[in-house]
Image (cartoon, helix red, strand yellow):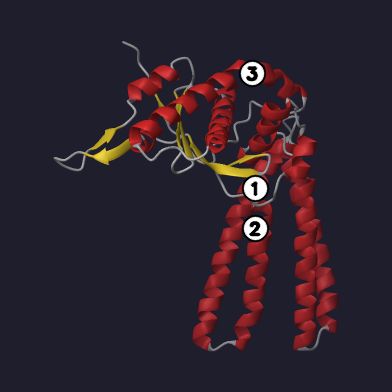
Amino acid sequence: MYRLLADVFNDLSIVLDCLSPALPQAMRVVLLGLSSILRALCGVAAGSSKASLSAHFARWGNLGELNAKDASQETVISLMGMMAGSIVVARVTSPLATWACLISLLAIHLATNRAAVRAVIMRSLNRQRANLVISSLLEDDTVLNPDEVSRQEAIFERDGILRWKGIFLGYASIGVELHVLLSSLTHHKSQGGGIKEPFVELEELAMIFQEDEYLMWYDSKQSQAYVVFKENASPSSQLQAWAHALLAARESAKRGKISDASSERTRATLQIVRDSLKAVKSSFERYIPRLQEAGWDLETVALETRSGYRIVQETR
């Protein structure tokens, strides 16, 4: 996603640079400033995605060798581009020809980069790939391999979305702080002030997940799942938490609208959390070897898109 997005930012900055001479001086400054911002965004997106792709291709610990070869290829391609550019510039003499050449080359550039991004087959499970793999596992008992998932996944996908075989169910936030989950466990303010009272006791939720390495609550009204990880949560536990959130969202969607009464909605949602946890735990352990045999790297954690938080649960 971010590799192609970096190319889009870069190409937009080139278009703005070419437009700037036709605008008044004041607008030209704004346009050139926007162009510089797009180039900076391109650098950030390209650098981060390059690091991830390099780690993906360096499968034998040869990351340094891979980066050296990549830098050499970039140098050769840049020289070839300069030679081709000097030939093209000498033959482009009118504004119409300039824009026709520019748009054509940018279209080719984006098309080839899109093809390159589609050709990459990642073996780690991010949120979108986890949706595809887990929904197929739980519904059809079929393990999709990385090649099959690569053909199905979209280049651009909204972060944190829960989909069951392409059907939108809701959203999930994983690795959140405990107070984020607690804020979802509140429903009204006390009469004496602005203190919110939980409609589900945290202790009750902690008892449900006593043997697991995470806590999960699904807000059926907002179609939003919240996952808090415990200290030393393993990669397989993180994948189980995402599978649990996905299954809870599906069960909530199947049961339809829950009563607006807080107590009834709470009990129904709590039952969904219990039932979906039981369903996931009954089958998840035997799915791990099947996923590894299909070629998935379950040791690389790709579900958290930012630095996550952990809690420590102590038993008295």
* Mark in front: 1 vs 3: 3
Task: Give residue 6's mark.
Answer: 2
Which callout, 2 or 1, points at the residue further toward the start of the chain? 2
| Residue that numbered label 3 is attached to | 283
Q: CA distance from mark 2 to mark 3?
A: 40 Å
User: Where does residue 230 sit, x and y in percent of width and height?
Assistant: 44, 24
**Marks 2 & 1, CB-CB < 8 Å contact:** yes
Residue 297, can we see it? no
Q: Nearer the viewer, residue 251 or 49?
A: 251
Is 247 left or right of 194, judged from the image as shown? right
- Give SS at disc 2: helix
**Which of these two is toward me, 173 or 275?**
275
For label 3, the crowd category at 10 Å Cα-Cα, with few meaning under 14, some 14 to 19 and many 20 or more, is: few
Amino acid type, mark 1: Ser
Above or below, comparing residue 108 to residue 296 in the picture: below
SS of the residue at dot 1? helix
Image height check: is 264 above or below 204?
A: below
**Amino acid type, residue under disc 2 in the picture:** Ala
Which residue matches tag 1? 49
Residue 94 % position (x, y): 78, 89
Q: Amino acid at mark 3?
A: Ser
